[in-house]
Image (cartoon, coloured by chain):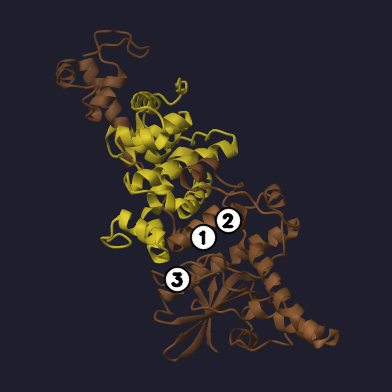
Chain colours: A yellow, B brown
Amino acid sequence: MSRPGGDSSDEALAAAANAGDRGALEVLLARHLDRVHAICRRVTGHPEDALDATQEALIAVTRGLQRYDGRSRFTTWLYRVATNAALDELRRRKRRPEPAELSDDRAVGGAVGGGVESVVAARLDVDAALARLSPEFRAAVVLRDLCDLDYAEIAEVLDVPIGTVRSRIARGRAAIADQLREPNAPPERPTR
Amino acid sequence: MTMNPTPEHPDPDHLDDGILSALLDGDPAEAGPEVAAHVAACDRCADRRAALAAARAALAAAPVEPLDELTRRRLVTEALRTATDLGPSPARSRAGSSGGSRWARRHPAFVGSAAAVVLAVLVGVPFVVGHGGSQADKTLSAAAPAPDTAQDSAGRFYGDLGDLSDHDRLRLRLSGTPAATDTGSGGTPLAEPGPSPAAGAAPGTPVPALAPVAGGLAGSSPEAARSSSPSTTLGFRGSGAGSSNAAKSAAPQAGPANGAAPSADAFASDQAATRDRTDADACVAALLNGPARGGRLTGSGTGTFRGRPAIVAAFELSGGTVAFVADRAGCAVLDRFSL
């Protein structure tokens, strides 16, 4: 399936949008909408919060695009906006995402078993596991494993040192692995 | 190679999760060749590495609920609607430095209304002065319709048109004929806030710096606006006033301007009008991709069709002007007729 905007690079579209090309901006937003929503969904842990955060992120992109200077990848800047929108949404709600209800017949180990798992079970497992992480850990893991950013990019997005990124990803992954294996284990908490 | 004891792995003879995770990510700073060699020879570390890899794979592979097309359109359309300060760089710079407030950008209806009132005063006062007080009524009637007659390539948005099953009444409204006898629920037509992207605004179209929209109050207080929790989000969960971090990372936010305080009802009306317009734009876009392909939008509005929330949009097609009534929730065509 072709992506919106054809072969135009994100950076070229951003430049065109900054020059007043509304069509370029629309293409840019449409192209990355799904990924922005995925970040917001995973970080907030709630479908409706994710929609609100996604809307806020798109508005922030629209209003702040002129501040994107092209020195980093457009997606790095975009993910930063999306992540902050999602974290803001969590703060605004003043609550942690609630773990999704697990099905009774879910196999221990769930989606990590590597076998044939249902889509729903996989989603519930991951939602439940992520929900037990603090937002900062969750964001680091999501940016690494969902968005495939490297440590340096994640450090830029989250505005923390690379060592902190490495630590959060490691501990977040470990917690997810443990949660997926033992859903009732105590939740992980950030220490820095 | 570091063998750090951790609560999870107190045995210093084995690798901790940090190193194993770095190994998964190919991070040479933490996981060099000696780490890989150790994992290859140590069942316990290999098992833990496999568990971390499975967690990573689960997250990467777990699906996120897909957005339906209407929601996608609404999200993008709403974001584009806020792009009132986009445009050629010099103008945008001026807007940024002159403090085009976040509130004003989120509530163009009020700014537009204030601008319309100022325009009416500027046009009307000299006319009244020049022609005497007896002409006041004529002056007002000449100045006030300006927003109603505003029209651009995206067509006029008429707001709430009431019963969308009444073809004769809709013909009067959508054909541009003043419906002098029509005092039903049809609302005052809203001026366009700018080319509608969902309606097919051409790439390269600059976004106006300030787009007048009728339907609000003249003058307003951003403080009051914030206290009433206005939001340009689609109200998926009654979103708050904005995202400080997202805004901080993306755009400077200028301070609000002073003015008179509008009522909460006015804000509710403004938000309802925004939702009406957003839904109409989304369905217009869907129609332009479907039965109205190749057509030119001449007007649109909202209302009800046999009790269902619906939108109506009229298009100039090769065979004449045709109005489509579509379900507001999914844009399915419910009715069509010639104007």
> Is any atom of residue A40 visible in this view?
yes
Q: Of tags 1 and 3, which is closer to the observer?
A: 1
* Number of numbered discs on residues: 3
Q: Which residue is drawn at 57% across and 68% down?
A: B211
Residue A109, above or below B324: above
Residue placed under numbered mark 2 in the picture: B100
Q: What amino acid type should be assigned to the residue bearing mark 3?
A: Ala
**Residue at (41, 43) in percent of width and height:** A39
| Residue identifier under label 1 | B85
User: Mark 3 highlights which residue?
Assistant: B286
Q: Report the chain holding disc 2.
A: B
Q: Which quarter of the image is occupied by the C terminus of chain B?
A: bottom right
**Mark 1: secondary structure:** helix
> Could you classify mark 1 by the number of other residues whose Cα lies within 10 Å: few (under 14), some (14-19), or many (20 or more)?
many
Disc 1 marks a residue whose amino acid type is: Asp
Residues tagged 2 and 3 counted as in contact (Cβ below 8 A): no
Q: Return the x and y of residue A23 as percentages of the image width and height.
A: 40, 66
Residue A46 visible in the current orientation: no
For mark 3, does the 10 Å Cα neighbourhood hold few (<14), some (14 to 19), or many (20 or more) residues?
many
Instruction: Give the answer, above or below, for where A165 lies relative to B75.
Output: above
